[in-house]
Amino acid sequence: MGRMADASDAALVQARRFDEIVRRFDRPVRALVGRGVRDPHRRDEIVQQTFVLAFRRLGTLAAPERLKAWLLAIARNCVADDQRRRARRLVLPPRDRPAPEAPPGWIWEEVATLSAALAEVLRLRYREGLGLDEIAARVGVPASTVRGRIYTARRTLRRRLKEE
């Protein structure tokens, strides 16, 4: 397809013939997306997202003769964004996940010796069964701070129990 395709691609961009752009580049965009996304529904969504983004940004394309490379770059970015979103969902616990098993009663005597902030997040997590976001809202700090406090409290308790 070489230089002739490059010139006709530029003409399509200048004429804003987006329907023809989609027809011409659907197959290569779909092939690229298909290498990173196996689920056919997600693949179709990402292909559509690629063309929607391209349509919105068509006026920003500095080199219309590089239309195909530009579209494929958008598709790669859409696939990468989708993979990042899916990875985050896999790491974060689902909202309906049961609360972690409550520690035995004697542990609470040790918890009482921790700072108020550390003891509170442990109580909310293990006694009330709240999730990180719920604890964060109740305590007034970010979820990452809650996660850090739980980690610090558990590490401190583990260290104290090893010493005994």
Image (cartoon, helix red, strand yellow):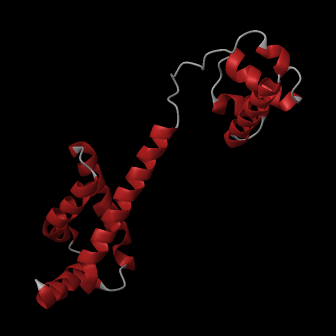
Q: Residue at x 25, y 86 (%)?
A: 65
Tell whether 89 sits left or right of 30. Answer: right
Residue 56 or residue 72, whichever sits in front:
72
Tell whether 82 sits left or right of 156. Answer: left
> Is 16 situated above or below 39?
below
Residue 112 or residue 55, whichever sits in front:
112
Q: Residue 55's x, y, as percent?
A: 31, 67
| Residue found at the very far top of the displayed protein | 105
Q: Residue 51's x, y, as percent?
A: 28, 62
Q: Residue 139's x, y, as percent?
A: 78, 31
Q: Residue at x 77, y 26 (%)?
A: 162
Tell whether 157 sits left or right of 12. Answer: right
> Is 68 situated above or below 82?
below
Quadrant of the drawing holding the C terminus? top right
Residue 123 or residue 76, whichever sits in front:
123
Q: Residue at x 69, y 19 (%)?
A: 126
Which quadrant of the structure image shows residue 61?
bottom left
Q: Residue at x 23, y 50 (%)?
A: 44
Q: Residue 111's x, y, as percent?
A: 82, 21
Which quadrant of the structure image shows residue 161?
top right
